[in-house]
Every structure is written in C-alpha cells, then in structure tokens.
C-alpha cells in the first residue's frame, strides 16, 4: 500500500489537474442546481476532490479544502442568499472539513509509516527482496543493487525461483521455500543460497524470510533478507586449511621426536646387550625405560586424532605392558590392573610427568617388590574427572622397610619421582602395609 501511494504521488501535476477538473465540475453541477432550483443538494460532489487532495497532499490538501469551502459558501450566498440555503451549505461545509481533517491525519500517519519503512528498507546493510504470495519480486532495496549489481526494474515481476543468477545447487531450496509460501507454512528456517553477482562472483548468503498477512489471513508479501557470509566462508576455509597444515606439521614433529627417542632406546638396548656388569645393566635398563616412556607419549600423540591430549588409561596400559615384558623372569606372575575415568585425558605437560612417575614406580616394584613370591598384583588408579586428581599406585609385594624415609633417600628413582611430583604441583604420601601404596594428589590444594 505504501509503495502504491508513492507511485500515485509521483504523478505530481496530473493529480493537481484532476483535482481542479473535479472541483470545477462540482461547482458547475451546483450552479445548474441553483439555476433550475433543484431541491436536493449536490454539494457531496466536492467530496471526491477533497478526499483525493487531502489523501495525496495532506496539509496542502486541507488548505485546498478550506479554500474550496469558502468559495462554496460565497457561491451559495451569491446564488441564493436565503438563510435556509446558507444553513444547508454551512452544514455541508462542516461535514467536508471534518472528512478532510480525518483523511489528512490518516494520510499523514500512512506517509510517516511509509517513510520509516522506506528508510529502514533502503538503508538496511542487508540486501532485501520483497515478493508476493506467488514468489514474484515486487521490490528490492539499494543494498541489493550495490552488492549484486542488478537493477530494480530488471527484477520486478520475475519469479524468484526463475532468476538466472541463483546457483543451480540452491534452486531446490528456493523451490521448497516457494512451496512453503503457497501452502501457508509459517515456520521457514534460514538456509544457504549461492548468488552470482553481475561480475560473475559467487556470494554465499544466509536466506531469512518473514511473511506479512492481510486482514483476511492471506499472504500480502514476503520480506527476504540476505546475509552475505562469503568472507566468513572464505576465512573458514583458510582457517581449516591452515589448521590442517599445522596438524600435519605437529604430527611430523611428534613423529620425529618419537623416532629420535626410539633411536636412543635402541642404542641403550644395544649397549645393554654388550654389558656384563649387572649394576650397569640395571642402570641402562632404567634409562631405557625412562626414554621409552617419553617416546611412547609422542607415539600416542602421533597416532591420535587430537594433538592436545592423551587418554591416561590407554597410555598406562601400553606402558605397563611393555615394561613388564622387559622383566622376563617375572612376566606372567605379576598382573597390572589400571583403572581411570573413561574420558580422562591429559595434555603433554601433565602426561609426561605422570608417565615417568609410573615408569619409576612400576620398575621399582618389578625389581624389588616380589623377590620370593610366585605371583603378585599391581594396581594403578586415577580418580577424579577434574582437578585435583588422585593417582594411587599399589602393589602387594614385601613393602618398604620400617625405617624408610623418602625424604632421606638419595636414590635416583626417588629423586626423579619427588621432582616430578613438584613439577605437577602435587603432594605425595607413602604407605607400607601388606605392600606399598603411594598416593599422589595433583595439583595440590595448598
């Protein structure tokens, strides 16, 4: 309606000419009525030019009404100065002015609403398309022209699903949308469309729509907003490509670190096979296990889908299995049971200290905890889904000496464990009763 009234206003001088003709005709008919003494009034003929003038020109139309009504009163007095006729003419004048005032107020409200609508429509940063209930385009805003380059006049009346610049892969969604409009569906979800601009560049846009209904519940028009997300799509592709390149680079780094550590493990193993001294062999084996623990971390990282974290349960199962296999004399007699939360994952800064601590404790148990026993059991448990975590290591071996004090023990293994616990900002508690139990809480709440 607002758009149509704007078109009528654009007729300009044509309407002024029509109003003048209607006014002259009204005066002429009233003149004839007075001359021939026709009893019924024909003053209502002024209603037509008054309504047209006040609707199209608001305040100017109201001034026109006052001027015409004054002329009408003068005209009536000149032709028939009787008081009855003047009273009748005055009645018509009051009615005319009242109608003119009402129409003027309504017209002003309508035009103010239209101006606000046009302002929002034309200055919106998003391209807008207006279509009727059958999908035919009735209007597009200036931003649509600026973004895609197509003129408003070239699109008017065309069905949106038949537009050449809509990409082929987007047509099924557009056809589905038109079907929803015709069937009266109110819930129309946003979807993506690809639109080719006048220069041939393909824009990726999110398609939003809302329907305006008339007083009968019929579709009057559909407002379509296009949100251009082309830059976001391009940026997302670049980020994904960059992320993939970084993942490949990080994977290669873990692979190379793992290979280098494996080389060190192999060198230590070769040296171990050539060493006859038992104490030297034990030292080399301990070094080999420590390096292998770190190597296994990088291998898990390399084979994992995520380079940020490692599942602690899966890692400790692999580590304990490989360490036990190195002690052929005890393998099969000692079982290792590992429990942890299913989705408990640690990053590299946490998993490496945990791995080295487990290696030291496990190696120590396999070497010293079961000297004369035919069988033994070691349990490793990680408790907690979030900090603080509780790492509990327990074996049912011979236990610690009665006078054992870890703070006064200077063996390398104990020093390494204490250092790693401090690195985790944790606390360690050792119990020796029917075996050895070590409880490490990290990070410490102190």
Image (cartoon, rainbow, N blue to C red):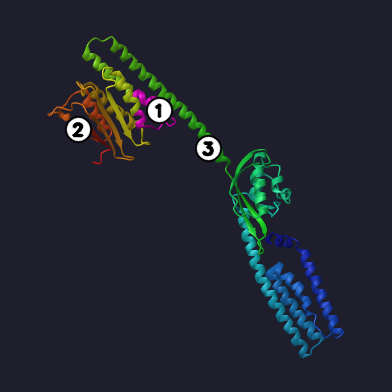
User: Residue at 44% across / 30% down in the picture?
Assistant: 305
Q: Which residue is mark 2?
A: 430
Tell me the crowding category of disc 1: few under 14, some 14 to 19, or many 20 or more residues within 10 angstroms, Cα based: many
Q: Nearer the viewer, mark 1 or mark 2?
A: 2
- Disc number for residue 236: 3
Residue 183 in view (yes/no):
yes
Under tag 2, what secondary structure? strand
- The percent position of residue 60, horizontal first and vertical second, equals 70, 70
Q: Nearer the viewer, residue 148 or 286?
A: 286
Q: CA distance from mark 3 to mark 2?
A: 52 Å
Instruction: Give the distance between the C-alpha atoms of the residues marked 1 and 3, in whole angstroms.
Output: 26 Å
Task: Measure how far apart labels 1 and 2 are at the Cα level.
Answer: 32 Å
Taking 34 as reference, is 258 left or right? left
User: Does 322 sit above or below residue 61?
Assistant: above
Q: Secondary structure at mark 3?
A: helix
- Residue 361 covered by magenta stretch: no
Magenta part of the chain: 294-315
Q: Residues within 10 Å of mark 2 (few under 14, many from 20)?
A: some
| Residue 329 position within the rendered picture, expressed as x and y whole percent measured from the top left | 26, 17
Mark 1, residue position? 301
First of labels 1, 3 by sequence position: 3
């Amino acid at each position: 309606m607002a758009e149509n009234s704007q078109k009528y206003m654009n007729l300009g001088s044509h309407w002024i000419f029509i109003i003048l003709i209607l006014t002259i005709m009204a005066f002429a008919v009233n003149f004839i009525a007075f001359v021939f003494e026709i009893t019924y009034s024909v003053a209502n003929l002024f209603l037509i030019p008054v309504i047209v003038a006040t609707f199209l020109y608001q305040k100017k139309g109201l001034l026109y009404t006052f001027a015409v009504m004054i002329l009408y009163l003068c005209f009536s007095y000149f032709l028939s100065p009787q008081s009855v006729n003047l009273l009748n003419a005055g009645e018509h004048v009051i009615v005319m002015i009242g109608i003119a005032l009402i129409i003027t107020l309504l017209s002003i409200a309508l035009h103010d609403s239209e101006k606000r609508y046009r302002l929002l429509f034309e200055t919106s940063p998003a391209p807008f398309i207006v279509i009727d209930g059958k999908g035919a385009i009735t209007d597009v805003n200036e931003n649509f022209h600026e973004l895609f380059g197509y003129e408003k006049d070239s699109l008017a009346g065309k069905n949106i699903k038949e537009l050449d610049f809509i990409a082929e892969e987007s047509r099924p969604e557009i056809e589905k949308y038109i079907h929803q409009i015709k069937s009266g569906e109110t819930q129309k979800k946003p979807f993506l469309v690809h639109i080719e601009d006048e220069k041939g560049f393909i824009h990726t846009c999110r398609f939003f729509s809302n329907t305006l209904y008339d007083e009968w519940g019929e579709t009057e028009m559909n407002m379509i907003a296009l949100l251009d997300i082309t830059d976001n799509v391009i940026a997302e592709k670049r980020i994904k490509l960059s992320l993939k390149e970084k993942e490949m680079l990080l994977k290669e780094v873990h692979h190379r670190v793992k290979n280098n550590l494996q080389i060190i493990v192999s060198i230590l193993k070769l040296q171990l096979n050539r060493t006859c001294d038992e104490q030297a062999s034990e030292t080399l084996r301990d070094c080999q296990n420590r390096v292998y623990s770190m190597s296994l971390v990088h291998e898990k990282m390399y084979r994992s889908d995520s380079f940020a974290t490692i599942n602690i349960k899966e890692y400790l199962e692999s580590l304990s299995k490989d360490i036990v296999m190195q002690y052929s004399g005890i393998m099969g007699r000692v079982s290792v049971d590992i429990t942890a939360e299913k989705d408990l994952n640690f990053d590299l800064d946490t998993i490496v200290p945990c791995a080295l601590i487990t290696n030291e404790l496990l190696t120590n148990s396999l070497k010293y905890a079961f000297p004369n026993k035919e069988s033994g059991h070691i349990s490793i448990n990680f408790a907690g889904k979030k900090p603080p975590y509780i790492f509990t290591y327990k074996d049912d071996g011979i236990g610690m000496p009665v006078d054992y004090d870890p703070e006064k023990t200077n063996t390398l293994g104990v020093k390494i464990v204490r250092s790693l616990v401090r690195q985790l900002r944790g606390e360690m508690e050792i119990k020796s009763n029917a075996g050895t139990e070590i409880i490490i809480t990290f990070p410490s709440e102190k």
